């Protein structure tokens, strides 16, 4: 009986309004387009490689617990750490987020990145940028809607924290729901009822100068307005800060990692010139 009552309260809380939010199912948001002073003739490009220095750490798997599809039994599984560094034999770091800080959005090229969709699966959320292969990170424009859809039969809930704060129920598979992204910053996506080890990240901004490094560490940012910027390499931290348990069931309900790792270097972009940069990163 306690489980049924708790479930009813939980569903009511996530299906209704949060303070300062729009009722689910009626989400609408409009943003005024920024004035554009983009000039293709005054742009350059940045290309380079993310390279690992030092010893690549050995990262252990993570033991997690989740409620099975019957809603009663607890399943214990082991997952690879989703934030373990991906380093090739030559030291190239794959899956690192490289972006520019200090860009005037009115001078940026028009937003040309595909929309982001979060797919919730048995082993956690994945991020899909348009029709591209699923990854762990996506890039969205402020004011756009984030689409979320369940790809499994059991009841699913999406938890978003950071630049967006909500918990959204997905009771039926292949029935997408959306939420507007009204703030710039990073949104961390996890399951609120499933595997707590796996997560996705969505960076929200007014400018599109973001890239995910390839398996060999290569990246490129094109059509960058001339100017002085900070080139930032962001990587999630694989070190676990703590695991929180539900006080009644003792089920591990949330896994928290230590703060993400950032490396930044100054760059100068000149019109019609390529800028080559090597981003050196490591375990610290």
Image (spheres, rainbow, N blue to C red):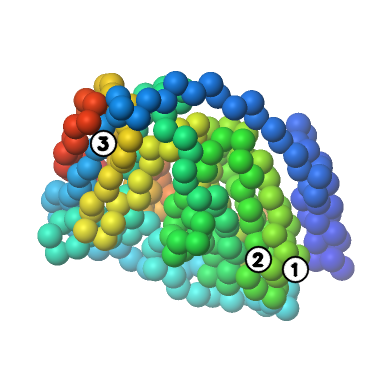
Using residue 55 as the reference point, say whether residue 97 is left or right of it.
right
Residue 44's label in the rendered image is none
Residue 45's label in the rendered image is 3
Using residue 101 as the reference point, say whether residue 141 is left or right of it.
right
Look at 80% across and 61% down and name the residue there.
7
Using residue 139 as the reference point, say whether residue 247 is left or right of it.
right
Callout 1 crowding tier (Cα within 10 Å): few <14, some 14–19, many ≥20: some
Q: Nearer the viewer, residue 204 or 77?
A: 204
Look at 15% across and 56% down and name the residue there.
91
SS type, badge 3: strand
Residue identified by numbered label 2: 150
SS type, badge 1: loop
Look at 75% across and 39% down and name the residue there.
28
On screen, residue 4 above or below 27: below
Callout 3 crowding tier (Cα within 10 Å): few <14, some 14–19, many ≥20: many
Residue 172's label in the rendered image is 1
Callout 2 crowding tier (Cα within 10 Å): few <14, some 14–19, many ≥20: many
- Label 3 vs label 1, nearer the camera: 3
The image quadrant that residue 4 belongs to is bottom right
x and y percentages locating residue 38 in the rendered image: 42, 25
Among the two numbered marks 1 and 2 on one chain, the one whose residue lies closer to the N terminus: 2
Q: Nearer the viewer, residue 18 or 196?
A: 18
Q: Are marks 1 and 2 in contact (CB under 8 Å)?
A: yes
Look at 19% across and 62% down and name the residue there.
88
Among the two numbered marks 2 and 3 on one chain, the one whose residue lies closer to the N terminus: 3
SS type, badge 2: strand
On screen, residue 224 above or below 114: above
State the separation of the CA atoms marked 3 and 1: 44 Å
């Amino acid at each position: 009986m306690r489980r049924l009552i708790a479930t009813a309260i939980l569903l009511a809380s996530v299906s209704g309004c949060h303070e300062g939010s729009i009722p689910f199912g009626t989400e609408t948001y409009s943003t005024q387009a920024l004035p554009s002073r983009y000039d293709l003739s005054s742009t350059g490009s940045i290309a380079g490689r993310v390279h690992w220095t030092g010893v690549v750490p050995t990262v252990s798997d993570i033991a997690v617990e989740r409620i099975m599809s019957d809603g009663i039994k607890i399943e214990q599984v082991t997952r690879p750490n989703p934030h373990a560094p991906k380093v090739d034999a030559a030291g190239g770091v794959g899956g690192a987020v490289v972006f520019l800080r200090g860009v005037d959005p009115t001078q940026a090229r028009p937003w040309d990145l595909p929309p982001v969709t979060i797919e919730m699966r048995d082993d956690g959320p994945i991020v899909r940028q348009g029709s591209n292969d699923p990854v762990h990170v996506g890039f969205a424009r402020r004011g756009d809607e984030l689409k979320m859809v369940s790809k499994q039969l059991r009841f699913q809930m999406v938890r978003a924290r950071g630049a967006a704060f909500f918990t959204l129920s997905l009771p039926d598979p292949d029935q997408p729901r959306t939420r507007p992204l009204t703030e710039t910053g990073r949104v961390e996506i996890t399951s609120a009822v499933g595997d707590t080890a796996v997560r996705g990240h969505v960076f929200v901004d007014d400018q599109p100068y973001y890239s995910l490094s390839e398996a060999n560490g290569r990246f490129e940012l094109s059509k960058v307005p001339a100017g002085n910027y900070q080139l930032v390499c962001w990587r999630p931290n694989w070190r676990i800060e703590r695991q929180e348990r539900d006080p009644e069931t003792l089920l591990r309900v949330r896994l928290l990692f230590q703060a993400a790792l950032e490396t930044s270097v100054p760059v100068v972009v000149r019109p019609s010139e390529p800028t080559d940069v090597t981003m050196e990163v490591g375990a610290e």
